Amino acid sequence: MKKLLLTFCILWMISSCTEEKVDAPFIFDNPEIAINIPADFPEVNDSFFTNKPTKYGVELGKKLFFDKKLSRDNTVSCATCHIQENAFADQNPKGIGIDGKIGFRNTPPIQNLAFMQVYNWDGNKTALENQVLVPIITPEEMDSSILEVIGKISNDATYIELFHKTFGDDTITGERIFNSIAQFEYTLISANSKYDKVKRKEGAIFTDNEAQGYQVFKNKCANCHSTELFTDQSFRNIGFPVNPNSEEKGRTRVSLNAKDLMSFRVPTLRNIAYTAPYGSFGQFATLKEVLDYLDKGVIESDNLDPILKDNNNRIPLTEKEKENLISFMKTLSDLEFITE
Amino acid sequence: MNNLKKYLFLSIISLAIISCEDDSIPVANNVTLAFNNTFGNTTIVLGDATSTEATQNTSSENQVHHFSEAKYIISNIRLINKDGIEFPYNVNNLDTGATIIDQSNPSTLQYVLNGIPSTEYTQIKFGLGVKAALNTLDQELFPAFYSADKKLHWFWATGYRFTKIEGFYGETNTPLSVHTGSVLGGDKTDETTWSSEAAHARNAYRDITLDLTTNAKVGENAPKINIKADFNKVLSGTNKITLNAATEGYVSGSAPSHHTSPETMVQFVDNMGGNGDTDITGMFSIESVEN
């Protein structure tokens, strides 16, 4: 017995010696990265604080976001629908996923999501980490499963190294995938538009049209499109044409309350010039069409937002006002965000 | 070393003693739950739109209907003995403690609980659906249950469908479709922000409590508990539901499908699973216990 033990000890000593000679010890060093929170932006989502972006977490999340292996047949990545040139939205009325299948709703931009409390058109998720699995398993999007994804990427040395650098060991789990993609998303902050530069007094100034458009906006739109994100994150029915898919009930799908029928989260208007078409299923091709519709009159219903209801179901706008509003909305374009 | 020998000897002796006891009364045995899915007292025969064999049922609101599919999830099973002690059966493991009852597949109608401690049971509790903490479509934790029936995945809500009924009603055999499930989506922070009424509707999991008509004597016997699920209650339970053609857009009403009328889902849920308060049996009852 004693002999055996001794042999073991010796063997162990030998093996640890060789190990040290060959490999430098792994030092886990994955610092949090500094996130510049733009002045006056709304409160950060709680989940951000439990999953703060780290150097390698973001790198890993970005790699996953652009990786088609997340889909069943390796043809669709998150970035297939969330395209940077379109502020991580796309130009289709409704999302187009695996086998060219057409989804249910318009693809929203991915920007400033750290400052949102509710996600998707109907707010069915309240943390980005919980959103990632949905496109991976949805048959019209990526039609895969988390074990399938883990299986595919666990053969890839680059991934193994990145998981190691991010989490301190090689283990690949769903939670780690979700967290790192969310970390990448948290870093997608757009706050360098002309509007921001005017606000921050960095030398930019509004043209006359833009300034007048801003005035109209404050009077007629800022009730809902408020805060520096241009959304108050509330759910409202503003009587847009209704999605012919009978599954679409708006917020009611989540609240199970008839008062929320066809109510949607007020969309942000940042980078709005890059995210056409508009509306929850891309029912408007241009900003002009949206404004014409609001001006002409929307669909009446019991739960139509009082701001429209008390105003003959419309937001009256002159042609000049529309033109100026569009000029103003274009000042929310952040060229750096879509190119860098 | 001497000590070790002593321990070994002792454990062998005690093992021998335990196995001696084993021979007379087993410490544990199986319990089989057998589900009988009915309209009233008639076991349901499924059938497509024009089937002549399918069991027809008439609701309290006089709507004739039959089903082509009836599935539901049973989980969180607990047996309570005559001293009031609760024996949970793999309640936190969907792979070993939950099952999908599918009327089209006879082998799913019986669910065997293994290794139930020997004693006399007077009551059974189980969940219709999956409790919120486990209802996250977590394939890593529960790969078997995840893959058991993907038609029960509720993708956007990242949870399971708890019941899925397809069928037809009325003279022209209009399709009906009742899907229920929780819309909490596994969001940690979410639940607290809702009113109790909204939370009740959004969490479609229902705990069922049934008193056994005869005590189930586990030991030498491996009892079988026959449970009836009376689907007449779907439309004619505490809530009397009239099916309307699927509505589009703004019109709300008691449309047949959860999808087309989510605001009425809770009525179906409460009819099948009770409201957790004044009704803790829903559509379930004990038919008999075979010891």
Image (cartoon, coloured by chain):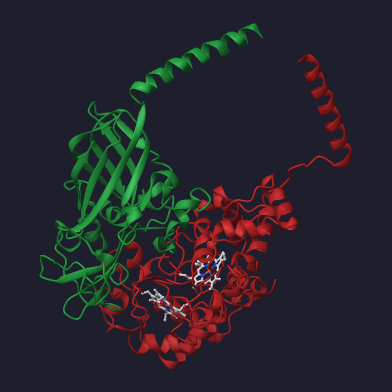
Chain colours: A red, B green
Is residue B275 something that shows in the picture? no
Q: Looking at the image, is A283 positioned above or below residue B15?
A: below
Is residue A74 something that shows in the picture? yes
**Res B81 → quadrant:** top left
Pick out the residue farthest to the top: B2
Q: Looking at the image, is B161 positioned above or below residue B177?
A: above
Residue B144 appears at what percent x and percent y?
Answer: 48, 52
Between residue B254 and residue B37, name the one nearer to us. B37
In the picture, measured across the screen, residue B36 lies left or right of residue A117, that is left
Tell me how many marks there are: 0
Q: Quadrant of the C terminus of chain A?
A: bottom right
Residue B19 appears at what percent x and percent y?
Answer: 43, 20
Residue A139 appears at what percent x and percent y?
Answer: 49, 70
Q: Looking at the image, is A88 positioned above or below residue A278?
A: above
Could you tell me which residue is drawn at 33 percent across and 77 percent down? A246
Pick out the residue farthest to the bottom: A319
Q: Quadrant of the N terminus of chain A?
A: top right
**Res B107 → quadrant:** bottom left
**Res B64 → quadrant:** bottom left
Between residue A33 and residue A203, name the one nearer to us. A33
Could you tell me which residue is drawn at 56 percent across and 51 percent down? A175
Could you tell me which residue is drawn at 30 percent across and 35 percent down? B222
Between residue A270 and residue B84, name the one nearer to us. B84
Residue B184 appears at what percent x and percent y?
Answer: 38, 56
In the picture, measured across the screen, residue A272 lies left or right of residue B119, that is right
Q: Looking at the image, is A293 positioned above or below residue A272?
A: below
Pick out the residue farthest to the right: A21
In the picture, measured across the screen, residue B196 lies left or right of residue A44, that is left
